[in-house]
Image (cartoon, rainbow, N blue to C red):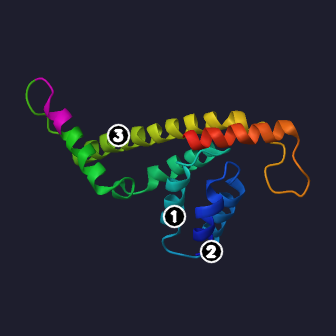
Amino acid sequence: RLFERGAACVGLDFLAHPFWDKYLEFEDRVEAHDKDYKIFSILSRVIKIPMHQYARYFEKFRQLAHARPVVELVPADTLSRFRAEVESESAGYQGGPKAISEMEIEREVRTKIDNFYLETFTSTQAETTKRWTYESEIKRPYFHVTELDYAQLANWRKYLDFEEAE
């Protein structure tokens, strides 16, 4: 619970990767029968956050996705839509409907799901890149009693203007 509440606050920070690493490590150490599902669920949230090490989390998410049942990968309506697309695509071949096995359908659906998450990755990558300009100029990211110099204040103002515009 503490991690869940903390994730709402600090988990969205550009440099939140140590927090997420600890959260994932904690869930990995807990002796629970659904530990892999919990880790997968956490990663499904993390891959949408524009932060410093977004690609590392996406790779871990993608590895786990290959081992998860297809019904856990996307919401039911999205899964139904992908399945219907695969079935209609297989019916559209020359020579009439083509009978494809359930395994072939699942493979094609998984490909669509993977492409769906690649779009999420691309979006997260774009959002991270937009923020990188400002983040790379921050010399002291957290509270400190000494004042910031003019260049740091100017960068923070530009960054805040950018985030408000977004």
- The amino acid beneath tag 3 is Lys
Q: Is residue 92 magenta?
A: yes
Numbered tag placed on residue 2 in the rendering? 2
Instruction: List x then y, in percent, for residue 79.
Output: 29, 50
> SS of the residue at dot 1?
helix
The crowd level at tag 1 (other Cα within 10 Å; few <14, some 14-19, many 20+) is: some
Instruction: List x then y, in percent, for residue 30.
Output: 61, 74
The earlier-in-sequence mark between 1 and 2 is 2
- The amino acid beneath tag 1 is Asp
Numbered tag placed on residue 8 in the rendering? none
- The amino acid beneath tag 2 is Leu
> SS of the residue at dot 3?
helix
Q: Is residue 130 magenta?
A: no
User: Considering only vertical position in the picture, is 121 above or below 8?
Assistant: above
The answer to whether residue 24 shows anywhere in this view is: no
**Viewed as shown, does residue 34 lie left or right of 60?**
left
Q: What range is drawn magenta here?
A: 88-94
The answer to whether residue 32 shows anywhere in this view is: yes
Frontmost residue, 28 versus 6: 6
Instruction: Between label 2 and label 3, give the one nearer the viewer.
Output: 2
The crowd level at tag 3 (other Cα within 10 Å; few <14, some 14-19, many 20+) is: some
> SS of the residue at dot 2?
helix
Frontmost residue, 113 versus 136: 136
Residue at the spot 67% in from the left edge and 48% down from the top edge: 14
Residue at the spot 78% in from the left edge and 37% down from the top edge: 154
Frontmost residue, 37 versus 41: 41
**Viewed as shown, does residue 105 lie left or right of 51?**
left
Numbered tag placed on residue 36 in the rendering? 1
Whether label 1 touches label 2, CB < 8 Å: no
Instruction: List x then y, in percent, for residue 23.
Output: 64, 65
Q: CA distance from mark 1 to mark 3?
A: 22 Å
